[in-house]
């Protein structure tokens, strides 16, 4: 007796084997199950709905193309988050992101005629500088800050996703915070960290 293609009848690993064997429509299950998580993780780092959607789509496309490399010792959700982190890191290194930073004030700063205080302007400048400093971090520091700081994952969860010991996660997080603080201090924003 053969199984029908009802998604709930398959284990994750069975579904992956079937997709790799040509039942590509089953991949929709993974997209539906993980799309909100992947989008939210990217959006917390990017702060742009349009770019986060593009990078989330790119993440799922990369995962699909590389599904044959999926190791059964991880879950798909952990694996896809790792791919999303790498995709986001690539974006931060891209010319596109550098152009976005250069043009950001024209696109995102909308001066209010009623209440645009110096504090509001300073906060926007501080956020812009933080993004620049964050973009300068190496991938291992970006992913640690993203997981533990932005997504509020535990050290244990982050260690599982990036496949390092818990002590390494703690060490990277502390080092990344110091690097960010130094970078922000150089631009007179260090006291906020």
Image: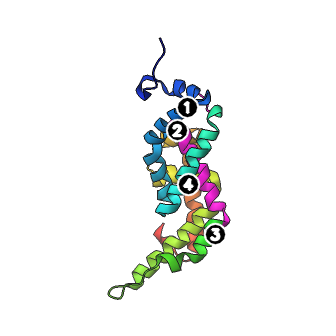
Q: Earlier in the sequence, mark 3 or mark 4?
A: 4
What residue is shown with label 1? 74
What's the magenta region? 70-95
Q: Is residue 85 left or right of residue 155?
A: right
Q: Is residue 138 magenta?
A: no
Q: Earlier in the sequence, mark 2 or mark 3?
A: 2
For disc 1, the neighbor class at 10 Å (few under 14, some 14 to 19, many from 20) is few
Q: CA distance from mark 3 to mark 1?
A: 34 Å
Where residue 12 appears, as percent x and y from the top left, is: 50, 28
**Viewer-nearest of discs 4 and 2:** 4
Q: CA distance from mark 4 to mark 2?
A: 17 Å
Question: Which of the two residues, 24 or 65, is positioned nearer the viewer here?
Answer: 24
What residue is shown with label 2? 78
Q: CA distance from mark 1 to mark 4?
A: 22 Å
Q: Quadrant of residue 93?
A: bottom right
Question: Under tag 3, what secondary structure?
Answer: helix
Above or below — where is 73 with respect to 193?
A: above
For disc 2, the neighbor class at 10 Å (few under 14, some 14 to 19, many from 20) is some
What residue is shown with label 3? 98
Where residue 190 appears, as percent x and y from the top left, is: 52, 71
Q: Which mark is residue 100?
A: none
């Amino acid at each position: 007796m053969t199984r029908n293609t009802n998604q709930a009848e398959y284990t994750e690993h069975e579904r992956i084997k079937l997709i790799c064997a040509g039942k590509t429509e089953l991949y929709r299950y993974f997209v539906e199950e993980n799309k909100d998580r992947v989008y939210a993780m990217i959006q917390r780092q990017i702060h742009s709905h349009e770019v986060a959607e593009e990078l989330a789509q790119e993440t799922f496309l990369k995962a699909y193309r590389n599904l044959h490399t999926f190791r059964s010792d991880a879950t798909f959700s952990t694996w896809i988050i790792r791919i999303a982190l790498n995709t986001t890191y690539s974006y931060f290194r891209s010319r596109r992101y550098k152009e976005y930073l250069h043009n950001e004030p024209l696109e995102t700063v909308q001066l209010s005629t009623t209440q645009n205080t110096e504090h509001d302007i300073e906060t926007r400048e501080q956020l812009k500088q933080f993004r620049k400093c964050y973009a300068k971090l190496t991938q291992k520091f970006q992913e640690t800050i993203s997981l533990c700081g932005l997504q509020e994952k535990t050290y244990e969860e982050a260690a599982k996703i990036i496949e390092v010991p818990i002590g390494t996660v703690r060490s990277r997080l502390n080092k990344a915070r110091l690097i960010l603080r130094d970078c922000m201090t150089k631009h007179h924003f260090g006291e906020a960290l």
